[in-house]
Image (tube, rainbow, N blue to C red):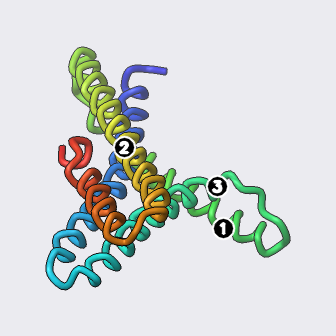
Amino acid sequence: MGLKDEAIELHRNLETVEAALKKLTDLTDQLQKEYNLAKRGSPFDRYDKLKGMIKACVEGLNSLSSSQDQGRKVPKGLAAAARAFSDAQEKLDAHMTIKKKYSGRQYHGMSKSEVKQACDKMKTQIEKNETRTKAIEQLIKQLHVSYEQSKQHMPRQRYQDMKTMVKTVVYDKAVTD
């Protein structure tokens, strides 16, 4: 694979990683907005709102994970096979559109050292975004575990626990960067 082909592939990977990170940061941004809005109102309302926002965040992560895993499932039945074929065709069309978009024109006229420098920069950005994505996923998974454990506590203690859980996610360095 040539240097320009590597740059094109890295560019595609960077966009994929950035899209996944954007979805996760959208989840945490929504959690933060809801948390800030929930500060108003009675404690009973805040308790219910905290439960709802934690559940919504965890379900959001699960729906993102399940949509990524959908391509790996084996369809059962004719309708499912047709749907899987249609989904595969849409992915192929999207891939072809991306391939046309990144035909290497942006690297045309660049020297090898400039292309290499661009590749190194993209590799660094990919690693940084992947690390951040994994950290946010882990925070939300821990939020779920902590939420389930908090069910053993009395409501007053559980309310404090849920507040702490949400603050941990919302104000974490991986989320705020």
Residue named by callout 2: 133
Image spot of residue 12 (x, y percent)? 40, 41
Label 3 SS: helix
> In the image as oriented, which residue stretches furthest toward the right?
77
Query: Which residue corresponds to the image point at 22% horizontal and 69% vertical from the top-left?
Result: 35
Answer yes or no: do the residues labelled 1 and 3 have beta carbons within 8 Å? no
Can the viewer see residue 99? yes
Name the residue rendered at 23%, 20% in the picture: 117
Residue in the picture at 48% in, 62% down: 152
Q: Residue 160: give x, y in percent of width and height.
A: 28, 63
In the foreground, 136 or 81 = 136
Task: Classify mark 3: residues with Cα within 10 Å, few (<14), some (14-19) or many (20+).
Answer: few
- Residue that label 1 marks: 86
169 lies above or below 130: below
Q: Quick check: marks 3 and 2 in contact, CB under 8 Å?
A: no
Query: Mark 2: which secondary structure?
Result: helix
What's the residue type where badge 1 is placed? Ser
The one nearer the camera, 172 or 71, is: 172
Nearest to N terminus: mark 1 or mark 3: 3
Quarter occupied by residue 123: top left
